[in-house]
Image (cartoon, coloured by chain):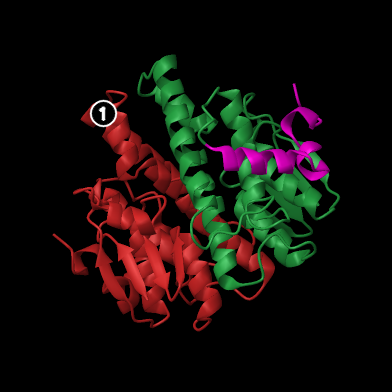
Chain colours: A red, B green
Amino acid sequence: MELFNYFRSSASYRVRIALALKGLDYDYRAVHLVKNEHLDPAYASASVSRLVPLLRDGEGLISQSMAIIEYLDETYPQPPLLPPDALGRAQVRALAQDIACEIHPLNNLRVLRYLSKELGVDEDGKNRWYRHWVESGLAVVEQRLSQPGAKHGAFCWGDTPGLADCVLVPQIFNAQRFDCRLDHVPTVMKVFANCMALDAFAKTQPSACPDAE
Amino acid sequence: MELFNYFRSSASYRVRIALALKGLDYDYRAVHLVKNEHLDPAYASASVSRLVPLLRDGEGLISQSMAIIEYLDETYPQPPLLPPDALGRAQVRALAQDIACEIHPLNNLRVLRYLSKELGVDEDGKNRWYRHWVESGLAVVEQRLSQPGAKHGAFCWGDTPGLADCVLVPQIFNAQRFDCRLDHVPTVMKVFANCMALDAFAKTQPSACPDAE
């Protein structure tokens, strides 16, 4: 397998964690987003959306981090990253999507670039925007971890790491990089600490990547 | 089952389509977003994120439209909304996420409100923002439908409607409402027309909902 990704891309980090949890080997292919390497024709021919991450497994080319992780979970089932029951799986997917659909899309590089270049939003406005979506979005995750029907233990769902943890941890890295408030999400931060104690999360973090700066 | 939703919410419409494709009955519970009914304590007690849609199935409360649709597909498997093979499922999920993670989150009501109220973006800037993400995002979907490994037929994947169609159709409704360009995505529009010829898509569209204005 080959993973086209970027050390600082949080969607890339989600997939690195999943691959590590599964104990799968892969070739690390760096695509430098800030240097616009994702716009190179060579990359565009493989990636229609020109986004990272992109996984190549044999003939298959798969984009979108959550689709990749579900693919890995179906193809390499051990250890499972989703609970065995449909309702549990739905709750874990909803948790992951609370981050992947409600927080992260508002804060990625191309969106921040559009805000400043096209709408003339200044640095301060951009930082407020960033923190607003992270802080309010993580407050939802915090509540969700303790709502009726939730089953958080050491991790987002029970005592083994799964899909929701793969998505949560990179979001906390982004939050810390942008000095977001995190004191209102103690349960989230406990889960984060438990994750970071594991090699699968620690050894794949941005600063540990081959293309880290 | 009960579906808490709003006629104009495109994430709600995704779930209405899936329920109709499965032939499942449910009680329609309207939550008026523009009147801020999603912030009522009564709704907040069921929905941590205060977003629609929210599905109640027995004891289970499930949020996030894609998580709900996967839950429905696992619990009521006929007709299936995902292909039988892992790679096909990954491609369909990636297509759905190209819309649900890259286009829709940038254009929902609370984001547009934040742009104007907090960042002082004017009406013209807001409309340019909206169209930019819809038009560039749908161009990706258009390319993806015809890329190597894609299997679009009458619908996004083959000749039966599935998860990607449930997500695509509501996005086209939004695009049309905001006068976005659509002449650059002919394949997408062919799929859209094929979907709208089916009751499951036509009879659940915003204007056909009990709370439509």
Amino acid type indicated by mark 1: Lys
At 50% from the left and 58% from the top, the residue drawn is A96
Q: Relative to B21, is A131 on the left or the right?
A: left
Residue A70 placement (x, y as % from top left) = 52, 68
Q: Secondary structure at mark 1?
A: helix
Above/below status of B31 relative to B24: above
At 83% from the left and 44% from the top, the residue drawn is B27
Residue A11 placement (x, y as % from top left) = 37, 57
Q: Quadrant of the C terminus of chain A?
A: bottom left
Q: Specify whether residue A62 is in view.
A: yes
Magenta stretch in the rendered image: B185-213
* Of the pair B46 and B192, the residue shown nearer to us: B192
At 73% from the left and 59% from the top, the residue drawn is B72
Q: Is residue B18 magenta?
A: no
* Of the pair B157 and A67, the residue shown nearer to us: B157
What chain does mark 1 sit on?
Answer: A
Magenta highlight: main SS: helix
At 47% from the left and 40% from the top, the residue drawn is B139
Q: Specify whether residue A204 is in view.
A: no
Residue A191 placement (x, y as % from top left) = 41, 66
Above/below status of B16 relative to B109: below
Would you identify the image quadrant in which residue A206 lies?
bottom left
Would you identify the image quadrant in which residue A114 lies?
top left
Q: Relative to B122, is B167 on the left or the right?
A: right
Query: Mark 1 = which residue?
Result: A117
